[in-house]
């Protein structure tokens, strides 16, 4: 019995200890003991190659984090304490793997290659953290670690906003610190060309500068008149590529084509179909003016790509391919001729022709193209890799066709989305992608076979910068979601645990503070779930935190919660219109932002509701119940508290529980065409006494819907019934000339009230 208890204690201690280690991403195999290695200024570094970048990096980082200026020793001096760094061909030669062994006497980092050594060093540095005492205790561990995926990426858009060279290096440092290894550098777009091309100087003389920028939300349609721009010289690029290479980060440059090319066309209008002079884009969104698929354009792009390929040693060159309106091509005689000459079906196949021709050129230089998932349309180029951003379907289709895939689905990997309650966050493009959502993302879809799964290279976090103008804000939007994705991509699936992750993450906040890296504290924001009580007796509000539940405080009178406010112990019953505010306190200190849930009661609140068409996987809220949970979606911030359908109608059947008398139905819809979200085309309301036979009682046509600006309000003569069916018809396909032309429009609806 005693033996069993000891074993149990050891197992429990081991798990407890691993969970406590401040390591992100969590390593594969770890053994922890209660002993520790004491690091002090007399510790030596012994490296099989002390001139290697990794050895110097170790010493330099230890100085920053501990203040110790450790010396190299030439040979192992058995009597002195050492950090040994050595390449070891005996251990598994899988790229990036490493072993870190810390005993009472020594630290030992070994790996089959410098990349593995670098990751071993990162793990050691995380165990040390920031610690300026004279002797630092590091727990004794045996770690044997390797990554799950080979593409562990972060993207940054430097076109919508430009970021200085020094910041790009800091961003690369962050990527490397979390054992990520790809930096996707989005260098060109409508709003600015950011890379010097010697053969085409106007690209940066003209294309890198716009006359003004959008101010505030897109819907406000406001602009400043401040000249804005910047670019990286080829020397800057070489310096950054070298910087990244040393840190085992591959830079994948993106040169957008055939769309998102207004900045290039403002410099060289002859490569558009119309040849008209245009300005560099000032407005966010999608521009109709795209490259014309003429021989001259291909010559231009091949010359540009030649310089790009010379600068970037990456296997993959990103050629964009997303959001290409076909309007200009439809009007162009030349395009008609090419379609005929090449025996193409339409402009979509012309896009495929464009990408195939570019691929041929890139392949001739010994490189491969990667493009956004639109490159699947009209047929995938033979060797192209696909970056799946409009959900995961593009990635699945590409993997099934045996093409390499990088997953970047918007709902999980777009770090320009809101990460906390939108009320508490600076203006963002929309969406709602919490740290938890990113953390729970699984890059390999379970619909793929084992063989097909091998085509999933990994995933990537994308940081589009329309609403992100400063380096600090890039960091804030990336951190800590980047760390969550890093763990998804590096660690074993079975080792992932969100509650444990956030505990490790809070230890990293201290490190990020001292490294002057901004980050969001939205993990402390309370999570709420609203549920109906027996379907007809009001609502209950559940509040939770991955931290200590006993730290939750709330108010019911609209005031901000304080430490002596009501303590949350069980779900709060909501029987009338009222506002609940809640916050999380730890050791008496407010953590994160308070949240607010404002309930508006009507006949529908908490009632039974069914949807004929389920909402999209990405905007499914708490299912149909979201529409009757008493909480109105915020019009400015459509990612949270709304249900979204892509190309499908909303058809809701509500059971009021008994015959009720009413004369008004209200709900909201979103009108945000730049985000492909459209008001419904038509709204129909039916009622029924038995839930079987329905009578139409109201209809709202397109004109009235447009006038409502999304605040749908339908009045009719007083009516009595138990069942109400509401059909809001989706707009359908987006028309040419609009962002997302040819795609399904989105329909966003929230909170149906009947009075
Ligand atoms: C994209 O977000 N347009 C790839």
Image (cartoon, helix red, strand yellow):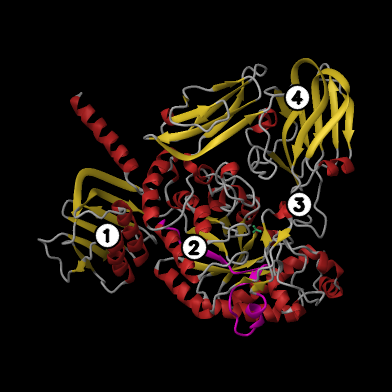
Where residue 100 sits, quadrant-wise, is bottom left
Q: Considering only order in the chain, which callout, 2 or 1, is on the residue closer to the N terminus?
A: 1
Question: Is residue 158 placed above or below 652 in the rendered structure?
Answer: below
Q: Nearer the viewer, residue 345 or 442?
A: 442
Residues drawn in magenta: 178-207
Residue designated by label 2? 182
Task: Classify mark 1: residues with Cα within 10 Å, few (<14), some (14-19) or many (20+).
Answer: many
Asked if disc 3 is less than 8 Å from ligand 1, the answer is no
Q: Which quadrant does the C terminus fall into?
A: top right
Quote the CA–CA distance across marks 1 and 2.
23 Å
Image mark for residue 109 = 1
Residue designated by label 4? 654
Q: Which quadrant does the N terminus fall into?
A: top left
Quote the CA–CA distance across marks 3 and 4.
29 Å
Answer yes or no: do the residues labelled 3 and 2 have beta carbons within 8 Å? no
Residue designated by label 3? 673
Counting from the top left corner in percent of width and height, residue 735 is at 83, 55
Whether residue 454 can be seen here: no
Q: Considering only order in the chain, which callout, 4 or 2, is on the residue closer to the N terminus?
A: 2
Q: Is residue 461 magenta?
A: no
């Amino acid at each position: 019995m005693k033996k069993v208890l000891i074993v149990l204690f050891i197992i429990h201690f081991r798990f407890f200890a691993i969970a406590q280690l401040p390591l992100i991403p969590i390593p594969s195999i770890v053994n922890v003991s209660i002993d520790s290695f004491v690091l002090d200024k007399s510790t030596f570094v012994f490296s099989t190659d002390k001139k290697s970048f990794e050895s110097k990096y170790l010493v330099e980082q230890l100085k920053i984090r501990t203040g110790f200026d450790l010396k190299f020793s030439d040979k192992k001096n058995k009597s002195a304490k050492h950090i040994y760094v050595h390449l070891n061909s005996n251990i598994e030669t899988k790229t990036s793997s490493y072993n870190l062994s810390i005993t009472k006497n020594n630290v030992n980092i070994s790996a089959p290659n410098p990349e593995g050594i670098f990751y071993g060093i990162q793990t050691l540095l995380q165990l040390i953290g920031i610690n300026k005492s004279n002797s630092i205790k590091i727990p004794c561990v045996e770690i044997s670690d390797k990554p799950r995926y080979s593409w562990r990426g972060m993207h940054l858009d430097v076109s919508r906003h430009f970021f200085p060279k020094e910041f790009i290096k800091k961003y690369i440092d962050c990527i490397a610190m979390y054992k990520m290894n790809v930096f996707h550098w989005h260098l060109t777009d409508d709003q600015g060309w950011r890379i010097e091309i010697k053969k085409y100087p106007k690209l940066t003389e003209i294309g890198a500068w716009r006359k003004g920028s959008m101010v505030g939300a897109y819907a406000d349609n406001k602009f400043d008149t401040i000249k804005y721009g910047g670019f990286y010289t080829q020397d800057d690029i070489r310096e950054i590529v070298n910087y990244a290479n040393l840190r085992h980060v591959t830079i994948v440059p993106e040169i957008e084509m055939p769309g998102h090319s207004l900045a290039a066309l403002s410099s060289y209008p002859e490569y558009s179909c119309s040849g008209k002079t245009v300005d560099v884009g000032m407005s966010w969104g999608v521009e109709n003016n795209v490259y014309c698929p003429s021989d001259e354009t291909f010559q231009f792009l091949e010359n540009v790509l030649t310089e790009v390929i010379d600068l970037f040693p990456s296997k993959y060159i990103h050629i964009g391919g997303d959001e290409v309106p076909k309007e200009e091509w439809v009007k162009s005689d030349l395009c008609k001729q090419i379609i005929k000459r090449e025996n193409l079906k339409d402009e979509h196949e012309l896009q495929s022709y464009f990408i195939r021709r570019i691929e041929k050129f890139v392949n001739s230089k010994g490189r491969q193209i990667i493009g956004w998932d639109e490159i699947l349309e009209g047929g995938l180029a033979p060797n192209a890799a696909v970056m799946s951003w409009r959900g995961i379907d593009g990635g699945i289709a590409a993997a099934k066709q045996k093409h390499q895939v990088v997953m970047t689905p918007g709902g999980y990997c777009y770090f320009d989305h809101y990460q906390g309650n939108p009320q508490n966050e600076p203006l963002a493009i929309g969406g709602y992608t919490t740290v938890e959502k990113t953390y729970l993302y699984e890059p390999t879809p379970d619909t793929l076979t084992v063989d097909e799964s091998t085509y999933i290279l990994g995933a990537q976090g994308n940081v589009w910068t329309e609403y992100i103008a400063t380096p600090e804000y890039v960091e804030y939007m990336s951190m800590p979601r980047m760390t969550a994705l890093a763990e998804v991509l590096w660690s074993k699936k079975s080792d992932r645990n969100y509650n444990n992750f956030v505990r490790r993450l809070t230890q990293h906040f201290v490190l990020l503070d001292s490294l002057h890296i901004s980050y969001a504290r939205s993990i402390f924001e309370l999570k709420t779930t609203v549920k109906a009580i027996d379907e007809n007796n009001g609502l209950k509000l559940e509040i939770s935190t991955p931290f200590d539940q006993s730290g939750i405080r709330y108010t019911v009178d609209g005031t901000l919660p304080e430490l002596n406010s009501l303590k949350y112990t069980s779900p709060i019953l909501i029987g009338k219109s009222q506002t609940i505010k809640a916050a999380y306190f730890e050791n008496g200190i407010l953590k994160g932002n308070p949240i607010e849930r404002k309930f508006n009661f009507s006949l529908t609140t908490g009632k039974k509701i069914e949807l004929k068409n389920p909402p999209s996987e990405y905007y499914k809220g708490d299912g149909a119940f979201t529409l009757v949970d008493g909480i109105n979606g915020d019009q400015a911030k459509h990612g949270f508290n709304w249900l979204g359908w892509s190309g499908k109608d909303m058809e809701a059947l509500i059971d009021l529980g008994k015959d009720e008398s009413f004369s008004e139905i209200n709900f909201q819809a979103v009108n945000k065409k730049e985000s492909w979200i459209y008001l419904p085309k038509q709204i129909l309301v039916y009622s029924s006494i038995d839930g079987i036979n329905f009578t139409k009682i109201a209809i709202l046509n397109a004109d009235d819907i447009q006038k409502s600006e999304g605040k749908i309000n339908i009045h009719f003569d007083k009516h009595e019934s138990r069942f109400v069916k509401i059909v809001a018809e989706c707009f359908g396909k987006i028309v040419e000339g609009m962002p997302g032309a040819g795609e399904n429009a989105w329909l966003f609806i929230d909170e149906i009230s009947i009075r």
